[in-house]
Image (cartoon, rainbow, N blue to C red):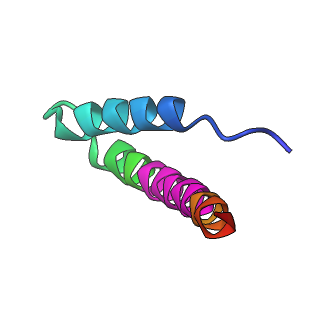
Amino acid sequence: MEKFDYPKAISRLEEILSKVEDPSTGVDDIDKYVKEAESLGEKCRKYLRTLREKADAIGSEK
């Protein structure tokens, strides 16, 4: 399983935002970018939940 690269995902989300805000981006492309952003957003939330659970587990060990 490939390790999730959170900083890279955030960078890609910023790129997508720029493209979606660009008036020259077509509607079909916007739809594609929004779907990609939704997928990346879910992966980021899952990654952060996992980190929080690990931190909570470490905190409860003390």
**From what the image shows, is residue 21 above or below residue 8?**
below
Q: Quadrant of the N terminus?
A: top right
The chief SS type of the magenta part is: helix
Q: Write the residue at 32% across / 34% down.
A: 14
**From what the image shows, is residue 48 above or below residue 33?**
below
Residue located farthest toward the left when viewing the structure as drawn: 23
**From what the image shows, is residue 24 above or below residue 29?**
above
Q: Quadrant of residue 24?
A: top left
State the image coordinates of residue 55 (x, y, percent, origin top left): 58, 58
17 with respect to 57 (left or right):
left
Residue 21: in magenta span = no
Q: Quadrant of the C terminus?
A: bottom right
Q: Write the residue at 43% across / 50% down.
A: 37
The segment highlighted magenta reads 35-52
38 with respect to 46 (left or right):
left
28 with respect to 18 (left or right):
right
The answer to which of 23 and 52 lies nearer the viewer is 52
